[in-house]
């Protein structure tokens, strides 16, 4: 078996493929919102219920499954319930709603500012100043976001205030999603935590929405896009990303997955005709570099959270 000390080409391909699939998934969601009139709330609810069921089945029936053990202690039960509600539901809804207000490319790039909030959280919690590369990452993230939402102008936004607000809420939700389940991911496998988190989150969201009303126009294109989001946008990339970790390691896989916003932008431009200017591309590039700088950081305190996020990552 390949490992981190002897990485295989297949490991790189799997991690890159997962990133591209996640990026395309956001564009499929934009297609459903704009072209087919599907409600973001409806999509979030059923994506979590259906994909969560499949991921949970994968967790339960895998070899040496620990899926049932997570219900053995009260502490673990509370943590998985909190993760399902304030981590999984929050990151799913804010991301898809941000797409509905802007586009998949912009929403994905804005969400990728999330690791900066992780750094800020640990700086406050541990009462330490950021390292130089973290200051650089913060500057790049702010610059990239500024270029993306203003195109360099101090006078007006090029996206709506709502899109900016929900995009930043998506980034904050991503930070919560990254930090909160760290202890769970140290005690249980990523399939178990992610499977239960998405499935329970979907059930919780059922109580707060009206998922029985089938919104939008449902034809072949709608079903294909929805099926892509469930299978090729959730279950399959999650599985192959986990498999890539055994070969190339979490840090390398994390770096490769930073191409997700680029893939979302390219597909949105090519498929849906989204206008992406030079300023948008430059802002995207700065945010991707931000993720790379933070991922390559050697600080041991921060890496468990970022590595845990990538191990349990679901878009």
Image: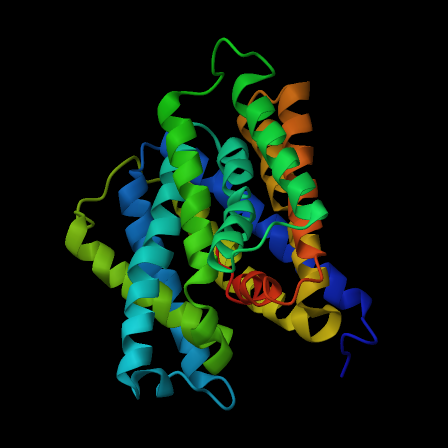
**Compared to 86, does 93 lie above or below?**
above
Residue situated in front as seen by the camera: 282 or 264: 282
Which colour scheme appears in the figure? rainbow
Left of 151 or right of it: where is 173?
Answer: left
- Observer-nearest residue: 143 or 42? 143
Return the residue nearer the eye: 234 or 200. 200
Residue 154 coordinates in the image, percent (x, y): 53, 12
Tell me if I can see residue 166 in this picture: yes
Left or right of 294? Residue 185 is left
Which quadrant holds residue 87? bottom left
Specify the quadrant that holds the N terminus: bottom right
Percent x, y for residue 182? Answer: 47, 69
Identity of the residue drawn at 50% across and 73% down: 190
Q: Does residue 291 lie above or below 56 as drawn?
A: above
At horizontal 22% and vertical 60% (from top left) the residue drawn is: 204
Q: Quadrant of residue 88?
A: bottom left
| Residue 220 visible in the snapshot | no
- On the image, the x and y values in percent for residue 19 come to 62, 52
Left or right of 279 in this view: 61 = left
Q: Residue at x 50, y 8 (%)?
A: 155
**Measured along the vertical axis of the image, is residue 203 above or below residue 174?**
below
Residue farthest to the top, as pictured = 155
The percent coordinates of residue 28 (x first, y second) are 48, 41
Residue sitting at the far bottom: 64
């Amino acid at each position: 078996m390949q490992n981190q000390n002897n990485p295989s080409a297949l490991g790189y391909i799997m991690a890159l493929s997962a990133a591209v699939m996640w990026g395309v998934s956001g564009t499929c969601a934009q297609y459903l919102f704009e072209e087919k009139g599907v409600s973001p709330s409806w999509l979030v609810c059923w994506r979590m219920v259906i994909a969560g069921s499949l991921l949970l089945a994968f967790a339960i029936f895998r070899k040496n499954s620990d899926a049932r053990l997570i219900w053995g202690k009260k502490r673990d039960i509370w943590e998985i319930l909190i993760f399902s509600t304030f981590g999984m539901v929050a990151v799913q809804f804010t991301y898809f709603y941000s797409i509905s207000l802007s586009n998949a490319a912009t929403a994905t790039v804005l969400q990728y500012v999330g690791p900066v909030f992780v750094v800020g959280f640990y700086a406050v919690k541990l009462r330490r100043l950021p390292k130089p590369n973290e200051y650089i990452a913060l500057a790049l993230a702010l610059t990239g976001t500024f270029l993306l939402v203003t195109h360099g102008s101090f006078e007006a936004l090029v996206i709506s205030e709502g899109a900016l607000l929900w995009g930043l809420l998506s980034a904050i939700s991503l930070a919560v999603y990254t930090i909160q389940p760290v202890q769970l991911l140290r005690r249980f496998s990523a399939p178990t935590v992610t499977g239960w988190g998405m499935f329970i989150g979907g059930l919780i969201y059922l109580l707060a929405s009206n998922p029985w009303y089938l919104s939008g126009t449902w034809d072949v294109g709608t079903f294909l896009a929805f099926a892509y989001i469930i299978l090729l946008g959730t279950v399959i990339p999650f599985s192959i990303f986990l498999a890539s970790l055994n070969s190339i390691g979490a840090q390398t896989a994390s770096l490769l997955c930073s191409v997700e916003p680029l893939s979302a932008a390219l597909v949105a431009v090519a498929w849906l005709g989204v206008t992406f200017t030079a300023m948008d591309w430059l802002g995207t590039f700065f945010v991707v570099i931000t993720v790379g700088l933070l991922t390559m950081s050697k600080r041991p305190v921060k890496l468990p959270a970022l590595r845990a996020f990538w191990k349990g990552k679901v878009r």
